[in-house]
Amino acid sequence: MFDTLSDRLTTVLKNLRGKGRLSDADIDATCREIRIALLEADVALPVVRQFIAQVKERAKGAEVSEALNPAQQVVKIVNEELIGILGGETRRLNLAKTPPTVIMLAGLQGAGKTTLAGKLAKHLAGQGHTPMLVACDLQRPNAVNQLQVVGQRAGVAVFAPEPGNGVGDPVEVARRAIEEARRAQHDLVLVDTAGRLGVDEELMRQAADIRDAVQPDEILFVVDAMIGQDAVTTAEAFRDGVGFTGVVLTKLDGDARGGAALSVRHVTGQPILFASNGEKLEDFDVFHPDRMASRILGMGDVLTLIEQAEQVFDARQAEQTAQKIGSGELTLEDFLEQMLAIRKMGPIANLLGMLPGAGQMKDAMAQVDERHLDRLQAIIRGMTPAERADPKIINASRRLRIANGSGVAVSEINDLVNRFFDARKMMKQMAGRFGLPGAGGGSKKLKGKKGKKGKKFGPKNNDAGGLPAGMPDLSRMPPGLNQLPPGLAGLDQLPAGFDPSKLNFGKKKK
């Protein structure tokens, strides 16, 4: 959603690089371009004015003029002010001292409240809570059924005593839900309320009646980030009519300009708590202002990428895989497991987008074909367990059988097997240089008292060049391939005094 804004801001700030000193004219021109970028992204005018005024004031002060690198200091200022617009610090849910904690969802029809209720319930259940969804949207056709389906997919209880479709009193349902939560010992209650296509008196009155009946600990205003400047107008109407304690942004995966979402926090004074960026229940994140600002400025979001990886990768399995990489024993079965884990983290293009400098790889990211991974998965699944464990036994007849079984050409089988062997050699080589567990190369201190290698540290050195058996001889590789890729230069030269044996890889799980 913020791609256009990100591109504009990145280009503006990039033009400052290389200047040893910034004049007032440079700063004015930069602020003018930032102002245009924010207005084109639908950011509210009062927010833009205040943002530009603060950036300009700080940029013309001693903070920049006395800096060794003025351009980087301006980027830092823009980043900090952007974090301020988005709310400053991450705000968590306020839980009641005496359960259940009641969370009420409010917003217009079509904003995604019902789906968001399931996402939030699953997120909270993963943190050890026992949430219960309450169907108080009794006007919209099949809203109750939709919430029941969403609750079933999320694996949480749903309280829906009324069929909906215009039947039932939502205020009474909300009141009874609190009693049911106490009886069934649910510590969180998520109340899904009705919406309208626009703000009207009936909508506000019903939402206010539900609020008065259940006295919620949190009222979350759910706003569609794609509705442009109407997001600010609607937020102000709900703030004055019902009141809310936090904002949830939905549909961040859309292609709208999305700048109005940046304005909601500043205009309403209430923090953004969560962000929804897809249709699946897993497409849901806690909103971190600093990480969102980093994404908008093209600096990536490595912390979120790490958190997503921790959720899908098993620590013990990852340690075993690292051992296999170091010893050159990685199998196609291990490769398949790692690929499936990465697929669980979301689309590959989204993961690449969290890396710093991803904006410079947009053309390459646009060409990422998820179907290629599906074909690789089909090929590996078409192999026998023995073939996955030892790809060297895959001869011509086996490759023909695998190709026919997986519906691909034999050339794709050849390509996969050859690339797998090349990748395994490269990973083993890198593991050896860093002295990772199981690697054949590394420090001399890995030797025992008699100067012999322990079995667990891989094969013995050969007589030719001192490299472990099976390691590629880089001196015989074609020109251009006997060196590390750009950006990794220097990794093959470990610092003086480096002792891999003292690295701490954490304790193994029992």
Image: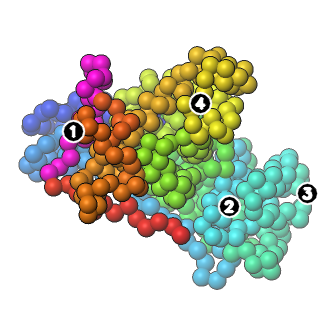
The residue carrying mark 1 is 490
The residue carrying mark 2 is 121
Dot 1: few (<14), some (14–19), or many (≥20) neighbours within 10 Å?
A: few
**Picture quarter containing residue 473?**
top left
Dot 4: few (<14), some (14–19), or many (≥20) neighbours within 10 Å?
A: few
**Picture quarter containing residue 25?**
top left
- At mark 1, the secondary structure is loop
Q: Amino acid at mark 2?
A: Ala
Q: Amino acid at mark 4?
A: Ile
Magenta residues? 474-496
User: Do the numbered discs 2 and 1 sit on residues whose CB atoms are within 8 Å?
Assistant: no
Residue 44 is situated, as x and y percent measured from the top left of the image, at 44, 42
- Rounded to the nearest angstrom, the CA distance separating label 2 from label 1 is 47 Å
Q: Amino acid at mark 1?
A: Gly
User: Do the numbered discs 1 and 3 sit on residues whose CB atoms are within 8 Å?
Assistant: no
Left or right for 356, reference 347: left
- Rounded to the nearest angstrom, the CA distance separating label 4 from label 1 is 37 Å
The residue carrying mark 4 is 393
